[in-house]
Amino acid sequence: MYPVISRHLISASAVLLSVTLIAPAAHAQSRAETLRYVTAATVNTLDPNIPGSTREAFALSMSSYDRLVSFGRKQLNGKWVFDLDTINGELAESFSVSPDGLKLTFKLRPDAKFHDGSPVTAEDVKWSLDRCVTAPVLGKAQLLTGSMTSADQFKVIDPLTFEVTLPRPDKLALPNLATVYPIIINSKLAKLHATPEDPWALSWLKENEAGSGAYIVETFKPGEQAIAKRNEAWNRGSSDKPASLKRLIIQSVPEPATRANLVERGDADLVIDLQASDVQALEAKSKLKVISTPQYNAVTFISMNNKIPPFDNVNVRRAVAAALPYDDMFKAALFGRGAPLFGASWADGKPPSGGYPIPQPVKLDLEKARAYLKEAGVPEGFATTFSFNVGQASTAEPMAALVKESLEKIGIKVDIQKLPDAQMSTAINEKKLPFFTEGIVAWLPSTDYFYRNFYTGNQRWNYSSTDNAELEKIAQAARFEPDKAKYEAEGKELNALHFEQMFQVPLWQPAQDAVMAANLDGYVYQFTRQVDYRNLSRK
Amino acid sequence: MGTIGATLIRAGRRFLSSLPALFGVLVFTFLLMRVLPGDPAVFFASGPSAGKEEIEIVRKQLGLDRSLPEQLGIYLYDVGRGNLGRSMMTGQPVAKDLRQRLPASLELTLTALVIALIAAVPLGVLAALRPNSLIDHGVRLFCSLGVCVPTFVSGLLLIYVFYYLLGLAPDPTGRLDIFASVPPARTGFLMVDFLLAGDFEGWWAAARQLMLPAFTMALFVIAPLARITRASMLVSLGSDFVRTARSIGLSRWQIVVTYALRNAILPVITIAGIVFSTMLGANVLVEKVFSWPGVASYALDALLVSDYAPVQGFVLLMASIFVVVNLLVDVLYGIADPRATVA
């Protein structure tokens, strides 16, 4: 009898709800010219240089600010991705590199204007780049990777000509100027808001935009939304026309299921951070467009700290690599959405390419794993912890369970440890974790960049705490290697060394699943792993 | 006159005596955040090119390079001047963040509390009038369901039905439809601001946006309120004065509402006060599911990334609200039961 009553109550409250909710839909503004992008993250600053900037802040800054140059795009397995090897002018109408590779000269577009209408001059460029290498900002460490470290290297030749001098030829100098940080700021405007304590107007630019980009920021509520309108005068895209969509709404919607509902109902136009299961469901309904691009500048690892026993023993690391259930993990964690970096076969045991990352010839082979453990002198196995961060729980949790189950079979007892994000990064930075999963990303994904940044030095990104003199030597040599064939050979050497020493186990490159309205066109996977709103248009 | 004065004096005394507790909360939260493992400097210096130097810059910016007592001194001095620090997460001063977000949380919580009270008190009274009857069991079942189903489940369910399937509710993304224009901010409460601006269409849009999250929260707190109403109604219905009233032949309505309910309402007020304070801090899940820009989800996000200032600010805010709500409950006591003011 109870259910009868409860049904009455439920239907009564349902009626009450319906009554309060029915109302005319009032959408004054034209929806078709607006892009509504929903995300779990949030834009937290309008200046991407501020320490603590989020990736969403990077993405917005790509549209609100111009840089001197930008990356082109290329097709990779039928999908558009950014192309590191094609550099186009953005604020620069043309640019040239001197024959000795030491001087980069940029001719600015004479018609380029900031959002307040003042022209973009070489003075603005100099002030902006000086700021990038002098002020306590994120750009400093980035431009360092392109041999730009001091304001003395930047010179104004005339109001529309700008020159960068390098201490040595550096193939990463130009690409560096296309990354997020070296934005060109309206220096006259910014200087008005500079103070003696804050000569680079960091605090003002954090909340105010002073750029020349394709979109003009209108509203900015950190943690909630950012709204921008099209800059009609912008002509820096490849088509020399302003961006296609008139308005841009970037909205934080923390709940993944809600984001999926919004995009499915057509209330949101684009989302890139859905759960893999939701993406699969939406793809199956085929009402929406789903573009899945393996994040080809990112890698997910299972890392072992090469300094903490027993992982200091190469055979233990090999044993782990042979005992991981790769296929099951790939299915359980990513639903197979991504590019696997396991299960390759290298002819005669040599890496087929000098690129990074390349699929490794590793597969689940418990017999081999046991043999390696025996060789390492721990045939009985050992106990260890496996850590991952809460932010990645949806993929890392099923993965950790499978790792635990599989390693148990060769005698390695694994304790799973789930850490809040800040705790995890602290523990990694302090090199306290023996065994964990993490990911890396590189904006300028070249082989030497990966090896130098992720396999050398006592720093956070060297997850495996690798300290290998040979690796360091080859990677440093490759850094300034002008000859392509030699560079490839050095890359192969590094890859061979990586596999031989098994510093850590590259698992896969997860896919970036962009789910969008069927009529949305032009999506390109960007180095920021975010959407470049300028690419998009409606059919 | 005299009773109002007495109430005010009592409230003032109560407020003063709660100041040491607030101070304790302040220091305790400060220490707790620093004892927790997790270094905000490392977390926030996590751009793809951030190295040791960036970590040091952030650490200095946050003042974490100083000694703990020094940090505490600076923090207390700042709080004394009304400066709660800056959030790394949003890049805004914490006081500004909280000021913007508190009205959102309060609006939601108050609406939910009103809905819950409107539903719970009659339910409790009905159950008490017919103990162990079908109605009583029905109310019990409804309450158990409300408490058992976690708010994020009921929230997602309501969204699924009313937004996804029926399309009756607006999209569950915050306080106002993203395409609607915001009223000039006077109080921060959208329902009030729209009324002040005379924009009834906007008011209705905001009200629609508020309904689903408010019902979700209300479902969860109907149970304690209904149960306490039932229990205290049972006591008061069984008491001498109700029997007397009955024997005199007063109307049923007068007996139940004027005599029994007024006497039974004290514990309900107490519980409502507690429920309100708890809801305000603990409705993280509802705020997350409905993308509601409230204080609780703000604090949770900050906690996950070890952003000290917002968490400390939030705890201080909650403690202060608790104090104020308790004061309010005290005053309401006086109105509901004149004996309370005499003491």
Image (cartoon, coloured by chain):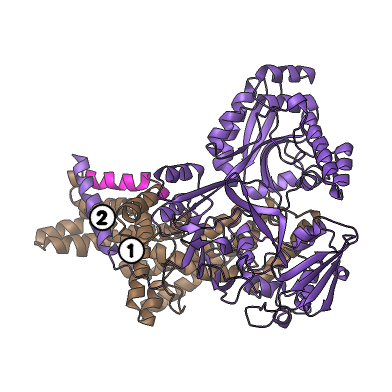
Chain colours: A purple, B brown
| Foreground of the two, B116 or A456 | A456
Query: Which corner quadrant holds the C terminus of chain B?
Result: bottom left
Label 1 SS: helix
Answer yes or no: is residue A193 visible.
yes
Whole-percent x, y for residue A6 in the image: 23, 46
Check residue B164 for magenta coloring.
no
Part of the protein shown in magenta: B137-152
What's the amino acid at mark 1? Val
Magenta stretch: helix, strand or loop mostly: helix
Horizontal relation, residue A339 to residue B191: left or right: right
The residue at which mark 1 appears reads as B114
| Foreground of the two, B45 or A168 | A168
- The residue shown at (15%, 62%) is B253
Q: Which mark is residue A328?
A: none
The chain containing the residue under callout 2 comes to A
Label 2 SS: helix
| Foreground of the two, A216 or A20 | A216
- To the question of a shared chain for discs 1 and 2, the answer is no
The residue at which mark 2 appears reads as A13
Q: Pointer 1 and pointer 2: residues touching (CB < 8 Å)?
A: no
Instruction: Report how far apart the C-alphas of labels 1 and 2 lie in the structure.
Output: 15 Å
